[in-house]
């Protein structure tokens, strides 16, 4: 197939070199590019040894049938590869781009473990789904029959959207409520565009809207509408609100201008990317351009902040983390990317306070060493007395993680049970909460996690909701 396409291009090029207009030249370029990319994907896919012990598959939260779609890709049967990959994953092109594959599928590839470098599973998954979109293989959502029952989903992140997709394909009436003005959750406003292009997310949002999912945006549940009102309007409800309460640093001077929260910083950058008016970005308050930036934290959010700051043209970017490289929670691949781009990591360093008056001028850093392991097995950082110093900074970004908001109080539903960490208590298989007909999925149950886990939860919750609707009569009567 590949050879035929190349021959066609060569023939066309020879026959009418100067008569061809810009669009046909672009078409030829596109074909050559596809040709090359097809070959690269097939080459990668053919490296899979079909080992028969697919650890990659068991370490993918969606249990994607990776060996089989790699085989199909290697054989040039891209449409079949796509069909197989989308059967278990609602947004394969998104996971292919942003899953921390080094901790999931690729990290457990047998070839990787034998020291020969992993099959780049994520890149192949992205490629086959991008191709499917280009070729029109991605099916629109067209339920065979409409059902009368409705489900209200609070939160338009990957958890909520994966559930919406599955329910809507079964003909259920689905309304998704979100307090933001765009759907996508952290895929839209948290994760930077250089990792996940926004048109990739918007294409999925549009597919859902086109398939009949009703989006009620700019609607903060608990403020603009009560939770009880949503429960009253729908036969079942899914809570997929994520975790947004930022952990703050408690240190003298933390209120100074120039010390900002990671999500505010990343949201401003993403909004700017969308072409929105963002006064805090324009004023420089949430913009790293020309500044000495210090990011505090060692997780993936911190990595996104440092890499965004580099792209905004920061003068220097340093990442302060209280443990060492080996004990960093963020993906090692992201750390390597950040280093390559010019970020300096200051290991074993924690903020003690901030210098400057109303505006930050520096971070007072205390040096740490790793002491004995705690109950979780991780070594506890201990302060090295007398080693403090000041790290100059014009912009300090706090990226210390997120906790759940207190939903039972905010929504006036004390019956909604939560864990001691404030996450919603839900059955781990059905995702049903302490309230009948109310389900929960994604970060609000797991705590800050991953897109791929939110997708899995959303899909499982949707299946359970279908069962619940059938049990309560309405679907069975259809
Ligand atoms: C900066 C950053 C980078 C990340 N990078 C990656 C990555 O590279 N790879 C990866 O796999 N994961 C990454 N994650 C984690 C991932 O984004 C989350 O695990 C995932 O988005 C969780 O999905 P969710 O559907 O549970 O919640 P979210 O995506 O957070 O969506 C929840 C939605 O609920 C809405 N909402 C909340 N409260 C209300 C309310 N009261 N009323 C109405 N709507 C409400 C919010 O506006 C939001 O749109 C990252 C997270 C952050 C913060
Ligand atoms: S969904 Fe994520 S973990 Fe699963 S195969 Fe794709 S990239 Fe790997």
Image: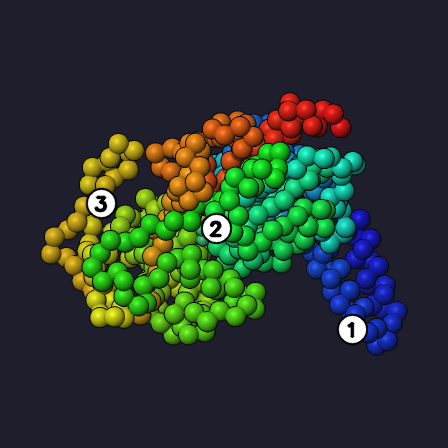
- Within 10 Å of disc 1 (Cα), the crowding (few <14, some 14-19, many 20+) is few
Seen as rendered, the residue at the extreme top is: 471
Residue 451 appears in the rendering: no
The image quadrant that residue 362 belongs to is bottom left
Mark 3 touches mark 2? (CB < 8 Å): no
Q: Nearer the viewer, mark 1 or mark 2?
A: 2
Residue 33 appears in the rendering: yes
Question: Is the C-beta of the residue carrying label 3 under 8 Å from the nearest atom of ligand 1?
Answer: no
- Quick check: 154 above or below 432? below
Closest to the observer: 59 or 110?
59
Q: Position of residue 257 (x, y in %)?
A: 30, 68
- Quick check: 37 above or below 450? below
Q: Position of residue 111 (x, y in %)?
A: 53, 37
Q: Residue at x 20, y 37 (%)?
A: 372
Considering the image in quadrants, where does the C terminus appear? top right
Question: Is the C-beta of the residue carrying label 2 under 8 Å from the nearest atom of ligand 1?
Answer: yes
Residue 223 is marked as: 2
Closest to the observer: 83 or 420?
420
Residue 22 is marked as: 1
The image quadrant that residue 375 belongs to is top left
Q: How many marks?
A: 3
- Describe residue 325's horizontal placement relative to residue 69 as left or right: left
The image quadrant that residue 80 belongs to is top right
Seen as rendered, the residue at the extreme bottom is: 18
| Sequence-earlier tag: 3 or 2 | 2
- Within 10 Å of disc 3 (Cα), the crowding (few <14, some 14-19, many 20+) is some
Closest to the observer: 141 or 12?
141
């Amino acid at each position: 197939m590949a050879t035929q396409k190349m021959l066609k291009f060569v023939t066309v090029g020879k026959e009418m070199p100067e008569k061809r207009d810009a669009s046909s030249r672009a078409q030829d370029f596109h074909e050559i590019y596809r040709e090359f990319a097809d070959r690269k994907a097939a080459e990668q896919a053919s490296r899979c040894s079909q080992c028969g012990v697919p650890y990659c598959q068991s370490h993918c939260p969606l249990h994607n049938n990776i060996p089989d779609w790699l085989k199909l890709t290697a054989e040039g049967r891209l449409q079949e590869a796509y069909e197989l990959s989308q059967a278990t994953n609602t947004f394969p092109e998104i996971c292919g781009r942003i899953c921390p594959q080094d901790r999931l599928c690729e990290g457990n590839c047998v070839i990787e473990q034998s020291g020969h470098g992993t099959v780049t599973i994520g890149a192949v998954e992205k490629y086959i789904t991008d191709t499917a979109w280009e070729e029109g293989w991605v099916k629109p959502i067209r339920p065979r029959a409409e059902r009368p029952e409705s489900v209200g989903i609070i939160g338009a992140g990957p958890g909520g959207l994966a559930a919406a997709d599955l329910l809507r394909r079964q003909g259920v009436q689905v309304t998704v409520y979100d307090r933001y003005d765009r759907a996508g959750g952290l895929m839209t406003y948290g994760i930077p565009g250089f990792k996940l292009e926004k048109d990739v997310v918007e294409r999925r949002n549009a597919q859902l809207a086109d398939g009949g999912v009703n989006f009620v945006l700019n609607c903060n549940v608990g403020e603009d509408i009560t939770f009880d009102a949503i429960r009253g309007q729908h036969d079942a409800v899914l809570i997929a609100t994520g975790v947004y309460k930022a952990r703050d640093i408690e240190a003298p001077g933390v209120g100074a201008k120039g010390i900002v929260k990671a999500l505010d910083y990343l949201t401003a950058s993403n909004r700017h990317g969308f072409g929105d008016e963002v006064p805090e970005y324009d004023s420089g308050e949430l913009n790293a351009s020309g500044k000495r930036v210090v990011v505090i934290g060692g997780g993936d959010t911190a990595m996104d902040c440092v890499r965004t700051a580099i792209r905004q043209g920061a003068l220097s970017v340093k990442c302060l983390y209280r443990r060492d490289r080996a004990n960093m929670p963020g993906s090692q691949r992201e750390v390597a990317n950040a280093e390559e781009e010019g970020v300096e990591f200051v290991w074993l360093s924690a903020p003690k306070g901030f210098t400057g008056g109303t505006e930050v001028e520096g971070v007072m850093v205390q040096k740490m060493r790793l002491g004995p392991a705690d109950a979780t097995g991780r070594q506890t950082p201990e302060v090295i007395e007398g080693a403090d110093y000041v790290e100059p900074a014009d912009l300090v970004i706090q990226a210390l993680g997120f906790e759940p908001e207190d939903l039972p109080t905010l929504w006036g539903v004390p019956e909604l049970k939560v864990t001691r960490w404030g996450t919603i208590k839900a059955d781990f298989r059905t995702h049903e909460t302490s309230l009948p007909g109310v389900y929960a999925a994604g970060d609000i149950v797991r705590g800050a996690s991953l897109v791929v886990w939110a997708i899995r939860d959303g899909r499982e919750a949707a299946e359970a909701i279908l069962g619940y609707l059938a049990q309560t009569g309405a679907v069975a009567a259809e």
